[in-house]
Amino acid sequence: FKQKTAYEIMPSLVGSEMCIETDLTYTESGYFSPLDPIPGIGWSYKITQIAFKLQPGEISDVIQLGDTFFILKVKDKKPPYIPEFKEVEQQVELKLKKKKAELLAEEAAQKYLNEILNLTKENKSLEEYLQQNNLALKTTDIVTRNKYIPEVGSASQIIDNIRNPEKGKFYPQPVRVNAGYLLLRIDELIPADRKEFEKVKNKFKEKILKNRKNKRLEEWFNQLKERANLEVYFTLKEH
């Protein structure tokens, strides 16, 4: 019913008055860039892609996200510009602090790794060292690229960033993941099964091509530099 209502009133859509008459939700955003969450909606690649193709005054078709429907109208567009430093001072400061924190974390991880690699030479116990430095040793089951590791994230972050791991040894450098840096010890390695790979080769190929396509779309999305004032005429929920 709600979806039908959206398509029925779209031709006569005039603004907040129509939303009041039809008991729908009307919201208006300020200026935002393609890299920002959409005020009142949040992150949505689909809606942002549509919104930035519209010209001022144009109204979109009905857009469905899950059980919610949107109709958008661009009220105004601001051309790309180089902002004054005062406008971005806070963002710059936050990025610098984040970058510095990442460098310090990497340096600390490398220091711990170097000391761990020297433990055997000094006849020290790994468990004692970890306890003294308030570090935790956690073990996973055998993981593949598409597995999720609690407190770490996707195993692909690790598998795609290590080369020639050796069984029973620590990987010679810290591995960067979303949660920070990991020191890895490879306890078990299972070689790929050639026959099994032949069975799933085509599906694997399709997945790689899909990932590449999504990556190109994401790169295009991140390169957009326009800013738009998006007017969301209403949202609808199915019942």
Image (tube, rainbow, N blue to C red):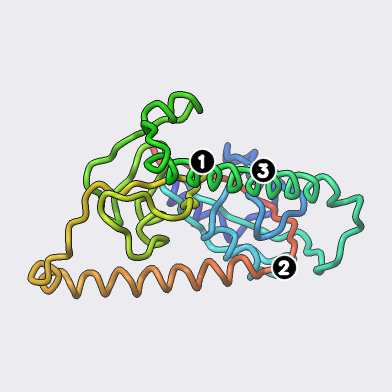
Q: Report the mark closest to the observer, 2 or 3.
A: 3
| Kind of residue indicated by mark 1 | Tyr
Distance from the alpha carbon under mark 3 to that under mark 1? 16 Å
Q: Which residue is mark 1?
A: 112
Q: Which mark is residue 68?
A: none
The mark that comes first in sequence, 3 or 1, is 3
Q: Which mark is residue 225?
A: 2
Q: Position of residue 165 (x, y in %)?
A: 32, 59
- The one of 43 and 66 positioned closer to us in this rendering: 43
Q: Is residue 1 something one can see in this rendering?
A: no
> Is the residue 155 above or below the residue 199 in the image?
above
Image quadrant where one finds the C terminus? top left
Q: What is the number of callouts on the image?
A: 3
Q: Are marks 2 and 3 in contact (CB under 8 Å)?
A: no
| Kind of residue indicated by mark 3 | Ala
| Kind of residue indicated by mark 2 | Lys
